[in-house]
Image: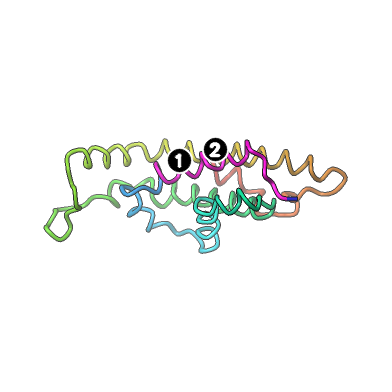
């Protein structure tokens, strides 16, 4: 049974927008290259943050959505350990040359870059909180939809670590 709940779809859109505007934006993207995230988690995160229009039409399957949430949670955990402690170093431009200077490197760009770096931890926390909220809502729906049988999340052992990944 596909999930087409309007509240769930709106929450996924909010998560997607937050990810693109505050985490994977033009100022932070360079640091995210250093994540040691497994390929399947990158792919799940991409499906979760890029292909939402497809899922709005077709609906989400529980297993697919759980895999995407797990991939996003794994991203959070790796970003906290691989990127956050050294984000300023990873994004320091060093001495600028004509070849390394960014186009439109205005004062406002430097301010926005500094804000993105300084707020990365908080934005990652907000992302994790929204993922947790979505996960809790999906688990509740899963239990309701599978009364009398084992819910999907109980059949996926990797979901036991969601809380640890998000904290």
For the residues marked 2 and 1, what is the alpha-carbon distance in whole angstroms? 9 Å
Q: Which element carries disc 1, helix, strand or loop? A: helix
| Disc ID at residue 70 | none
| Disc ID at residue 18 | 1
Can you name the residue that lies furthest to the bottom here?
A: 39
Comes first in the chain, label 2 or label 1: 1
Horizontal relation, residue 154 to residue 117: left or right: right
Residue displayed at 28% across by 50% down: 91
Residue toward you, 70 or 163: 70
Give the quadrant of the C terminus.
top right
Give the colouring mode of the picture: rainbow
Q: Residue 23 location in percent, x, y?
A: 41, 45
Q: Nearer the viewer, mark 2 or mark 1?
A: 1
Q: Magenta region: which residues?
A: 2-21
Horizontal relation, residue 62 to residue 27: left or right: right
What is the quadrant of residue 101 in the picture? Answer: bottom left
Q: Which element carries disc 2, helix, strand or loop? A: helix
Q: Are marks 2 and 1 in contact (CB under 8 Å)?
A: yes
Residue displayed at 79% across by 40% down: 144
The answer to whether residue 22 is magenta is no
The answer to whether residue 16 is magenta is yes
Residue displayed at 74% across by 44% down: 142
Q: Residue 132 location in percent, x, y?
A: 59, 39
Q: Circle 2 is placed at which residue position?
A: 130
Residue displayed at 59% across by 49% down: 69
Q: Residue 100 location in percent, x, y?
A: 18, 58
């Amino acid at each position: 049974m596909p999930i087409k709940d309007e509240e769930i779809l709106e929450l996924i859109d909010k998560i997607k927008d937050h990810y693109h505007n505050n985490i994977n934006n033009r100022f932070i993207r360079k640091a995210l290259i250093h994540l040691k995230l497994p390929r399947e988690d990158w792919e799940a995160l991409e499906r979760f943050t890029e292909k939402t229009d497809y899922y709005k039409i077709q609906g989400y399957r529980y297993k697919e959505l759980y895999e995407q949430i797990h991939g996003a949670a794994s991203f959070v955990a790796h970003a906290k350990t691989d990127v956050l402690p050294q984000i300023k170093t990873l994004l320091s431009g060093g001495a600028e040359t004509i070849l390394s200077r960014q186009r439109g490197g205005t004062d406002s760009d430097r301010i926005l870059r500094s804000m993105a770096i300084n707020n990365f931890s908080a934005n990652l926390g907000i992302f994790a909180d929204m993922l947790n909220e979505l996960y809790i809502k999906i688990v509740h729906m899963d239990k309701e939809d599978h009364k009398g049988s084992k819910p999907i999340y109980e059949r996926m052992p990797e979901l036991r670590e969601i809380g640890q990944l998000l904290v």
